[in-house]
Amino acid sequence: MDRTNLSEIYGKNVFDDHVMRERLPRPVYKQLMRTIHDGLPLEPGIAETIANTMKDWAIERGATHFTHWFQPMTGLTAEKHDSFLSPTSDGRVIMEFSGKELIRGEADGSSFPSGGIRQTFEARGYTVWDCTSPAFLKEDSSGVALCIPTAFYAHTGEALDKKTPLLRSMVAIDKAGVRVLHALGYTDVNKVFATVGAEQEYFLVDKRQYQLRKDLIFTGRTLFGAAPPKGQEMEDHYFGSIKEKIANFMREIDLELWKLGVPSKTKHNEVAPAQHELAPIFAPCNVASDQNQLIMETLQKVANRHDLACLLHEKPFQGINGSGKHDNWSLVTDTGINVFAPGKCPQDNNVFLVFVCAILKAVDTHADLIRLSAASAGNDHRLGGNEAPPAIISVFLGNFLTELITDIARGKKVEKTHADVMDVGVDTMPKLKKETSDRNRTSPFAFTGNKFEFRMFPSSGCISEANVVLNTAMADALLSFAPILEAADDKKAAIREILNDTLKRHGRIIFDGNGYAQEWVDDAEDRQLPNYPTTVDAIPSLLKDKSIALFEKHHVYNHAELQARYEILIEEYCKTLNIEARTMLSMAKTQILPAALKYTTEVARNVSILTQLGNFKISAQSELLVDLTENIEHLKHSIDKLDQNLHEVYHMEEGYERAVKFKDVILANMEILREYADELEMMVDEKVWPIPNYGELLFRV
Ligand code: ADP
Ligand code: MG
């Protein structure tokens, strides 16, 4: 595709700054920008004009409907389409879209998870326009709809979505960041906001094969499947050349995303066979969150057009690397400072030093909440595997920075800067400067040059979850430094003091070693770092006094909202496991067991015929028959056990104990059932095996 083409396509379906400047009356545009950029309340009088302009723009592009687009607690996006049609008294119709319709929608349907905040008898909830994230057109073969990004609250003002708390946390980080920067002498700074770039990993499999697997359809992951003869051990897929079918898919993904103004930038093959990654250019965190939802949606939609199925689950295949979503996070000012850019002389960079201290304090103090933000039933299968960071939170700074801040804290004179040049021993190669930080792929929270990369995050999750915690914890740490910096005449001395204190209290969170090694688990225990291996272990952190105090202080969640979220997390975990267990039972009873019996009958017939004929050796077949029948017995036994336990656990009273039982009993039963089924898969004629195997799923696209 040539250049002109790309610039024509890019943002074509977005009601962005360019369109607004061109189409809105000047005063209206200016007022709206004051809300978008300066955080001032939206002037109600201008909504009518904006709505009208938006409608005309959308209708010119073929739109017939509009929808408030929001992120309920399901983690997915929700939309309810209304047409622009409005009947006139003479029996005709006109196209209408009022300011009121733009600003506020009522989401009827009381069926979104609310954790008890919204009872069905008082089901009123509002979707409210988030003008800081641009409206866009969703365009496909079913038509064109104008989508208005919104937040979703109950009529009492309590958040029912993942976006409201994110917006609140952005207010918190803005206030705290500006205060600290002013104290450091940067009085021209008016705004601080988090930027986020989320790298999305996913798998692509053949759609027909996908459709033959109930587990993929109902749960997003394979619940059965013996290891294929070849997995990822040859390391030949990572960054490998992209197959044409996949390249075509990726090209269409880029086009669709570019039209939506999502700056999809890099794409490559990942470690596992059939695994890929897409990364957009970073954006303010609420925009990045909306864009990531669009990326996930577009991946699935476009895959379908290419006869592929896109798997966003964290662990679609046992024994094969899972998928994450690296949340690259930084803080920048309206004056263009990236607070985590070390610059040429990090030792003299007050902003950098203070903000690094703040992140160390934030991550150490609220490691449990950061861990929880990445917790899901799906991610439990990934974290701690030798492909993904462990469930223990630590921060990687790299040798250079760790030494640097330690030296400053100790009052040692620091002269060395990082301007070393790499020498590869070949004169014709350009000379590159060494980076201040190395790479450490095993760290859950790594400094990567001018940002931090939170690597634990699940591939299917809504990144608001992680960024709410990062923003709020960071705001809190910054606020604790603000008075010290404000009071100090000698800023350098104050910063040294802060560094010293931070390293003393929170230095334990810095870890530059191999996060995948067992020794780290022991070391972390010695450092008294929290380790919550599973979602169920992590959930109670949300209601600790310290967590409630943090979120209430910064007006991100009130107690009732936290309680609701706690209940939703438990409910979601139990529902996920219940669906998985039921899917397994269904597949085991109606597909795997019948196939095993069919093949066993065939072997038995063979033994019987040969015996009747006499004079043939039948020991091989007899042994096979014994193995088969023994395995079938185990399989049947594990089915019955899972069935019975599921019945009991399912009927337990709702609450935390039930989630514990799902984890300890049901998950364990499921693993055993799988083992027998996978063993049978390796014994039974593949022609009678009822579901596509791992080799077919992973290597056929
Ligand atoms: P990596 O460092 O993981 O190899 P990149 O440098 O391409 O890859 O960055 C990965 C993601 O981080 C991209 O989405 C990129 O836009 C984002 N990113 C880069 N700089 C920042 C920043 N200052 N704040 C937030 N995200 C950033
Ligand atoms: Mg990365």
Image (cartoon, helix red, strand yellow):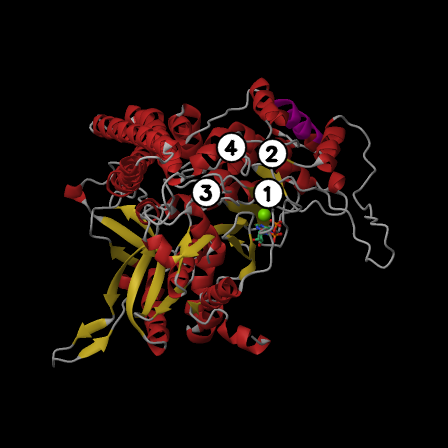
Instruction: Kindly identify which residue carries mark 2.
Output: 395
Region of the chain picked out in magenta, as a range: 496-505
Badge 1 density bin: few <14, some 14–19, many ≥20, Cα 10 Å: many
Does the residue at mark 1 contact the one at mark 2 (Cβ under 8 Å)?
yes
Mark nearer the viewer, 2 or 4: 4
Does the residue at mark 2 contact the one at mark 4 (Cβ under 8 Å)?
no
Q: CA distance from mark 3 to mark 4?
A: 13 Å
Q: Position of residue 134 (x, y in %)?
A: 42, 62
Among the 4 quarters of the image, the one containing residue 439: top right
Badge 3 density bin: few <14, some 14–19, many ≥20, Cα 10 Å: many
Instruction: Kindly identify which residue carries mark 4.
Output: 384
First in sequence: mark 1 vs mark 2: 2
Mark nearer the viewer, 3 or 4: 4
Among the 4 quarters of the image, the one containing residue 78: bottom left
Judge left or right: residue 160 versus residue 179.
Answer: left
First in sequence: mark 1 vs mark 4: 4
Q: CA distance from mark 1 to mark 4?
A: 20 Å
Q: Nearer the viewer, residue 617 or 178?
A: 617
Q: CA distance from mark 1 to mark 2?
A: 9 Å
Q: Nearer the viewer, residue 514 or 680?
A: 680
Q: Position of residue 341 (x, y in %)?
A: 67, 47
Query: Does residue 239 belong to the magenta stretch?
Result: no
Q: Please give the count of numbered marks on the rendered protein.
A: 4
Q: Amino acid at mark 4?
A: Gly
Instruction: Kindly identify which residue carries mark 1.
Output: 452
Badge 4 density bin: few <14, some 14–19, many ≥20, Cα 10 Å: many
Q: Amino acid at mark 2?
A: Val
Instruction: Kindly identify which residue carries mark 3.
Output: 458
Q: Residue furthest top?
A: 526
Mark nearer the viewer, 1 or 3: 3
